[in-house]
Amino acid sequence: MEGLAIVVAFALIFGRLLAISAVLRRIPAPSLRLPTGPIPDTWPGIVETQCPLARRLSSEERERLLRLVQIFLATNTSTDPVGSPLPKR
């Protein structure tokens, strides 16, 4: 009897997770405007050496990755371990 209660509880939880995920998938994600400016010449080499998984990306996917890095660097400030902002290069 106790095993049946566990199975029913699991089924209810799993059913609710499926329902929630179905609702969340219907919410449209805002479109992301990628920058169109030039990508620094050194970035593709850095991605090649520091991100081995990026080697498997197509050229379009790799460019999208570099554009997302541009957005990340433009919107996030770096700090040293003490909390002081690092100088911009």
Image (spheres, rainbow, N blue to C red):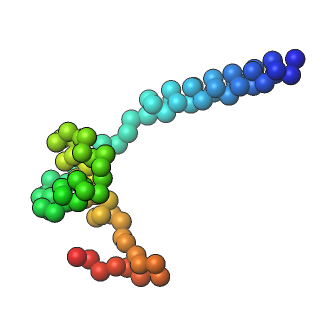
The residue under the point 37% across, 79% down is 85
Q: Is residue 76 visible?
A: yes
Which residue shows up at 82% across the image and 21% down it?
Answer: 3
From the viewer's perspective, tell me whether residue 78 is left or right of residue 63. right
The quadrant of the rendering that contains the C terminus is bottom left
The image quarter in which residue 74 lies: bottom left
Residue 33 visible in the snapshot: no
> Of residues 72 and 22, which is closer to you in this image?
72
Q: Quadrant of residue 6?
A: top right
Number of numbered discs: 0
Q: Residue at x 35, y 42 (%)?
A: 30
- Taking the image as shown, residue 21 lies to the left or right of residue 5, namely left
Above/below status of 76 relative to 51: below
Q: Residue furthest right?
A: 1
Answer with left or right where residue 53 lies relative to residue 10.
left
In screen coordinates, is 69 left or right of 39?
right
Q: Position of residue 49 (x, y in %)?
A: 25, 56
Identify the residue at image location x=30%, y=64%: 73
Instruction: Place residue 18 in its image quadrant.
Output: top right
Q: Is 6 placed above or below 82 here? A: above
- Residue 27: horizontal and vertical position, in percent? 43, 34
Where does the N terminus fall, quadrant-wise? top right
Q: Return the x and y of residue 31 as percentages of the image width and height.
A: 30, 42
Rendered location of residue 58, percent (x, y)? 20, 39
